[in-house]
Image (tube, rainbow, N blue to C red):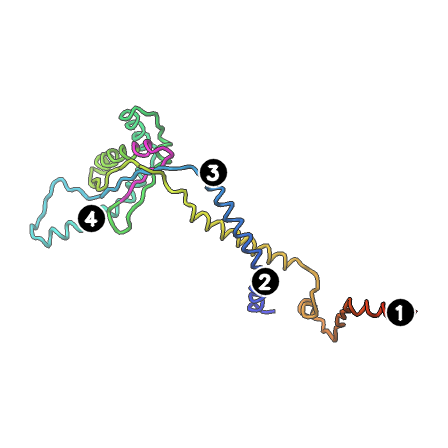
Amino acid sequence: MNIDANVQKIITLLIKKWKLIVLFALIGTLLAYVYTANFTTLTYSSSVEFLAYAHDSQQEFSDSTSAAQQISNTSRMNYAIKMLNTYVELFKTSEFNKTVASDLNDNFNTSYTAEQVKNAVLYEEVEGTAMFKVTVTTTDADMSYQIAEQLQKSIPEKMKRTNNGLVRASVEDQALKASTSESLGYPKKCIFGFVIGAVLAAAYIILRDLLDVRIKGSDNLSERYGIPVLGTIPEFEIKASSNSKNSDKKGAEK
């Protein structure tokens, strides 16, 4: 049998068993809903958006024309974009997070660890720009806001002290305290459960068919063993009513 025939056979098989696939999909959706409702922890996020820019303390230009200034500004911006990834990796170091945690505890009278700060922060670079976003997500709205507010100060200070301060950062969007928790994502997780359930049902149906060694008919016999079928014995069905009439006639004759 060629590949197209195998694919057609599988599709036909899945269509015949569509009820089982739908059942598994609905079970998967239900399990995803139950899991989300009972085992998903609510989280709160606060974010800060920065602009990285190349800083020239001397401000010396050999040509003061607008064209020369435009070229200079463009090259400075390209340098900031090029170096941005390096600074983001610097913010992920244990040393930087220890400093952030220490300053955080001093300013807010808390007891956060460097590991807590590091695990709560996500850095995202906006592709093709010198913008980058820092998002802090924890199970406590105050904690997320406090870490974000501290990073709002610590990141520009760190960039100013690094690489002779050639690249610095300005805060373009300040941190705000989350008023509500993040969505539990019921639709996305339920869709995921639906798909997983349908896939498992399809895999079960296909494997069951492949492992079934029973001969289901003459076509199946020829296909599996290459044995020509000369003829088949038809199945004769004798109606119950005919049998009862015949038995009544015999009883009357006796």
Viewer-proximal residue among 189 and 160: 189
Task: Answer left or right for 92 relative to 195.
Answer: left
Distance between mark 3 and mark 1 Cα atoms: 76 Å
Task: Answer left or right for 155 relative to 209.
Answer: left
* Residue 193 in the image: above or below residue 233: above
Which of label 1 and label 4 is nearer to you? 1
**How busy is the neighbourhood of tag 2: few (under 14 within 10 Å), some, or many (20 plus)?**
few
Q: Amino acid at mark 4?
A: Met
Distance between mark 2 and mark 3 Cα atoms: 36 Å
User: Which of the 4 image quadrants contains residue 165?
Assistant: top left
* Residue 39 - label: 3
Viewer-proximal residue among 115 and 211: 211
**How busy is the neighbourhood of tag 4: few (under 14 within 10 Å), some, or many (20 plus)?**
some
Q: Are marks 3 and 1 in contact (CB under 8 Å)?
A: no
- On the image, the x and y values in percent for residue 236 come to 76, 71
Q: Which residues are magenta?
A: 132-146
* Residue 77 - label: 4
Q: Are marks 2 and 1 in contact (CB under 8 Å)?
A: no
* Residue 107 in the image: above or below residue 166: above
* Residue 89 in the image: above or below residue 237: above
User: In the rendered view of the protein, which quadrant contains the N terminus?
Assistant: bottom right
**2 or 1: tag closer to the N-terminus:** 2
The residue carrying mark 2 is 16
The residue carrying mark 1 is 252
Which of label 3 and label 1 is nearer to you? 1
Secondary-structure class at tag 2: helix
**4 or 2: tag closer to the N-terminus:** 2
**4 or 3: tag closer to the N-terminus:** 3
Q: Amino acid at mark 2?
A: Lys
Distance between mark 1 and mark 4 Cα atoms: 111 Å
- On the image, the x and y values in percent for residue 193 come to 49, 49
